[in-house]
Amino acid sequence: MNRRRFPWLSYAVVATGAVLTVVPFADMVMTSFKGAGEAGTLPYRFLPQAFDLSNYRAAMAQLNLPVLFRNSAVATAVITASVLLTSSLAGYALAKLRFPGRHFLFRFVLSTMMFPPFLFLVPHFLILVHWPLAGGNDLLGRGGAGLTTGVVALTVPFLVNGFGIFLTRQFLLSVPDEVLEAARVDGAGEFTLWWRIVVPQTRPVLVTLGLLTFVDAWNEYIWALLVSTANPDVMTLPVGIQLLQDHVDPARTMPVVMAGLVLSVLPVLVLFLLLQKHYVRGVMLSGLK
C-alpha cells in the first residue's frame, strides 16, 4: 500500500543507495587521473585539473604486473574451481544422501563459519611450512620451507568453503527427491546423478557462489601478505599495489595507488558484467537476499 501511494519514496531510496555505492568507485577512478599533490588537498576537488595517464604508466613501471597478475589469476582460478567442486559435491551429499552422522557433519560445517579467519592464519602458515616432503622438508616436515615456496601456498587454506557447502545444500533441498529416485531406477549412479541432474539444477547458485568466491580470492590481502613475506615471488596484485604507497608523502603517491587499484578491479568488473544475469537469478532462487 505504501509503495503504491508513495512510489517516489522507493525510487529515492534505491537512487540514494546507488549513489552511495558508485561515488567511492568514481572517486577512485578520478583520483587515478590526478597529478602529484592534488590528492588530499583542501578544499577537496572531485575532478582532476587535467586527465593524465602518467599514474597508470608509473604503476606499470613500478610493479611487475605480469607476475602479479599471474599469481593472482592462478590462485583465484584454483580457489574458485575447488570451492565450486567441493561445495557442489558436499552439498549434494548432505542434502540428498542418507548416511550416519549426516546431521553432525552439517552442524560441523556450520560451526566453521563462526570462527574469524584471522584465528587460523598462524596455524595455516605453520602447517604449510612443515608440510612433509615439500620445499626441502623431510618426512617429518623439518629442514625446509614446505609449501610456502610456490603459488600453492596462496590456495590451500581456501580450497573448501563452509558457506559454499551451506548455500548449495540449502538450495538442493528444493530439488524433488522423485527426480533422483527415477534416475536411480533407470540405473544412474551417484556421480551421474550429480553431474547430469544436480549440477544443471544448481547452476544459478553455483554462478553466485563462484562470483563471491572469485571476488574474495582476488582481493585477499592478509594471507597473501603473510605468504609473500616468506617468498616474494608469490606476491599478488593487492599486496603489490600496497607497496606503491609512500607513507612519507601519501598525497604524491595516492594517485599511483588508485591507478593500480583501478587495474586490479577491472577483471572483477568484467566478470561481473558478463555473469550479471546468472548472478541475479542465483540470488533470487537461493534466498541469499
Image (cartoon, grey):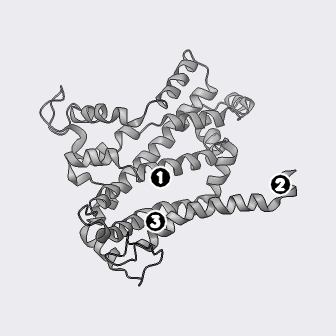
The residue that appears at 64% across and 45% down in the rendered structure is 200
* Residue where numbered disc 1 is placed: 215
Which amino acid, mark 3?
A: Leu
Q: Residues within 10 Å of mark 1 (few under 14, many from 20)?
A: some
Residue lying farthest to the front in this orientation: 43
Q: Quadrant of residue 134?
A: top left
Depth check, mark 3 against mark 2: the one in front is 2
Which residue does the image show at 87% across and 56% down from the upper left? 4
From mark 2 to mark 1, how far is it between C-alphas? Answer: 34 Å
Q: Is residue 138 left or right of residue 57?
A: left
CA separation, marks 3 and 1?
11 Å
Residue 189: image location, x then y, percent: 60, 31
Which residue is the extreme one toward the bottom?
Answer: 50
Residue linked to disc 2: 3
Determine whether the residue tagged by mark 3 lies in a helix, strand or loop: helix
Question: Counting other residues with Cα less than 10 Å from the Cα at mark 2, is it few (<14), some (14-19), or many (20 or more)?
Answer: few
Q: Is residue 41 visible?
A: yes
